[in-house]
Image (tube, rainbow, N blue to C red):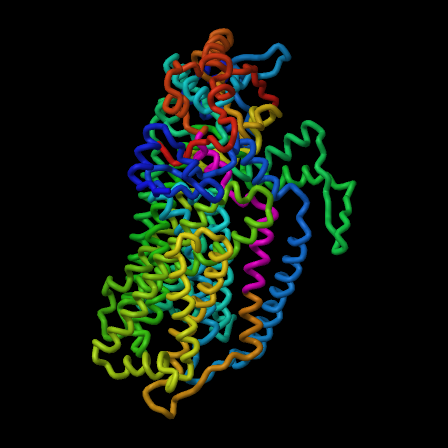
Amino acid sequence: MSDAQMKPGTWARDIAMALGTYVPGFARPPARFVSERGQPVHGIVGEFATPAAVYHAAEKVRDAGFKRWDVYSPFPIHGMEEAMGFRRTFLPLLVAAIGFSGAGLGLLFQYWVSAAAYPLVVQGKPYGAWEPFVPIMFELGVLPSAFAALFGMLMLNGLPRFHHPLLARERFLSVSDDTFFLCIEAEDAGFDADRIRSLLEGAGARSIELVEDDA
Amino acid sequence: MMRKSPDQISAERLAGQVSAVALAHGDGTLIEDPAVYAPLVVNDRSFKDVTETVCGYTEQPAPLWWYAAITVSSATALLAAVMIPYLIITGVGVWGLNNQVDWAWDITNFVFWIGIGHAGTLISAILCLLKQKWRTAVNRSAEAMTIFAVICAGIFPGIHVGRVWFAWMLFPIPNSNAIWPNFRSPLLWDVFAVSTYATVSLLFWYMGMIPDLATLRDRALRRLATGRKMPCLFMLPTGHTVELKFVNIDRIRAVVYGLLAIGWRFSSRHWHRYEAAYLILAGISTPLVLSVHSIVSFDFATSVVPGWHTTIFPPYFVAGAIFGGFAMVLLLLIPLRAVLPNFSDLLTLRHLENMAKILLVTGMMVGFAYGMEFFIAWYGGNEYEWSVFINNRANPARAPYWWAYWTMITCNVISPQLFWFRAMRQNPWVIWFVSLAVTVGMWFERFVIIVTSLHRAWLPGEWHMFWPTWVDIGTFAGSCGIFLTLFLLFAKFLPMFAMAELKAVLPQADPHEESVHHEGHDPVYAVGGGPGGVHGEHPGGGTHPGYGGGH
């Protein structure tokens, strides 16, 4: 299968894109759109002044049927999940699985040490009594859960990633201060520059720009 | 003039006749009407103001007091760097320990510091689950303080074992002797609880800081991109500043903060998982923080030493930890609030008052525990237990450590009672002095529990006093130096407030704000950059209605 045959939004293209982004030595599939300068296009970004403006713009973009797009804001905007219409993350399930496994393994390990590997008589209690194992079982459930919550969150977010086409633009960096952005990516199957421009204009973007991928 | 009843005031406010701010005093956050949310950030600060204020603390040259403070604190920290090797080389006999009192300042300091380390997680986890938005003003610095306190706490059990090179035996590591630790011992539970707590607090602190580190990174990158070079300034003890012209400090900042921010780009899809992870961490940290001090208390409660063998210890220790931790937060933040520019816009009098109320509540809980312990010592009918309370602690005629016991009672039970008076709990310097008293009192609480219970065993021939040596004092002072040095470094180099969280609780952060508070306007967000420039602003700071916690 050649890169050119990969349709936008397919698994094959997503995997090739991820390999090209994160693994040295892999090339990304060719860009679907090329700017006038001959650079691959990352997407079209609209800039908004207030949370309310970007919130309502997100609702419009959602209703227009786009899939590969994102809102960038200095803080999490309340209700943005609904406005963007994406599913809840499965991170809690991941953390629960890892946490309960940690607690279970912690219990087994303590039992093995106390009843099998190094049986000691302590206060005449049975070697395998589970009650004294509860505190450490709890701690060994919490510790991997915390790692899973932080690193699972980063993994699902595709971080660490030290380069991104948006972060290469000086104007975008005000997102960490007080500006709100909405970016529709060229990877979206329905990407059409003119349509997106008029959609963002209609949504009240105070500036609309094409983002090139210089990487 | 007749005083209005609170009901009448509320009715007038609801009818729009009186603004809530007209009823407020102090900095505008001390609103007595419980129906009104006090603003969480005062002086109508915008998102940009929050960024500028918080980043300013790390970007502006450090003020002279910072250099003075870190000189003193790091010199004190050096004391620990001398005392600890001396202890390790010579042996624990250099402390004032003896055969009877084999735990004294070492474990007192351990419990003292680990207790202080509870406020950060309490603020970030429990207050998060309880949706207490005012925590955003203090959570970052309280979490930082937690980590530094746990570092100080970790020093003492590590070095008190005597043969430090065997400390690895605390952990269940396979070894050639085929010896394993005893999982039925609370001391081992403590190892797991404290190390888990330290790790989870660090992860929580770091995760909360990722967006703010990205803000610092972006500011450095923007200055690099626009050629606005930030001077690299150092202040000399004489007060003169020296500029290092050949250093482009923004390059260093962009790289260091960039690595720490690991490419955070403020995406909403990322924020969604971030908030889920934050809530999970808050959810697991809540039982964790309660478990840690419970387990610390098991070190004592599961023994058969009179004065230690009591079931009230776990809740009593947890309440005391929260009490002491909040006192330390206030002790550090009230002076910073006085000296750092615009700090008081973000940490308002209302926040201080809230924390003073927590001090009052937890102080009463601790006082109740002292009373209940005493009552049970009498009611339980165990003469040894009663003897510890009367002859070792409370009776000045018979207990050699009576002064320690009564210092504890005065500082922890009596001093917070000042906060029943509104004027007292709304005065930062009164709060500061009470916090100082509470910090001293909480140290004495641990000293009283540990030393007064141990120093007289069953036979009078085993009775010994404990007096600290210069090594005891030097090590404790050194740990205070380490704590303050780390906190000062944090205040200079890391974002002291959770900027993203602060912005999210500003009134203008609500995407539905305009339609709620400005009736009569169609949803005109779609036109010309949204209504933010027109209706979103509140000209004239005095007319700002007291909201900020709504929705």
Residue B287 in the image: state x and y as whole percent: 32, 53
Magenta span covers which residues?
B480-507
A131 up-or-down from A148: above or below = below
Identify the image quadrant of the C terminus of chain B.
Answer: top left
Name which residue lies at 59% across and 72% down. B83
Q: Nearer the viewer, residue A99 or B467?
A: B467
**Residue B127 is a magenta residue:** no
- Residue B490: within the magenta? yes
Image quadrant containing the N terminus of chain B: top left
Is residue B548 at all visible to an observer of this figure? no
Residue drawn at x 63%, y 61% is: B74
Q: What is the total number of numbered labels drawn onto the structure image?
A: 0
List the single residue furthest toward the front. Answer: B1
Whether residue B290 appears in this view of the structure is: yes
Q: Is residue B489 above or below residue B546?
A: below
| Side of A142 relative to A187 (left or right) | left
Q: x, y (%) of residue B436?
A: 49, 62
Could you tell me what secondary structure mostly forms the magenta stretch?
helix
Residue B107 occupies which quadrant of the picture? bottom left
Query: What residue is rendered at 52% in x and 36% in y?
Result: B43
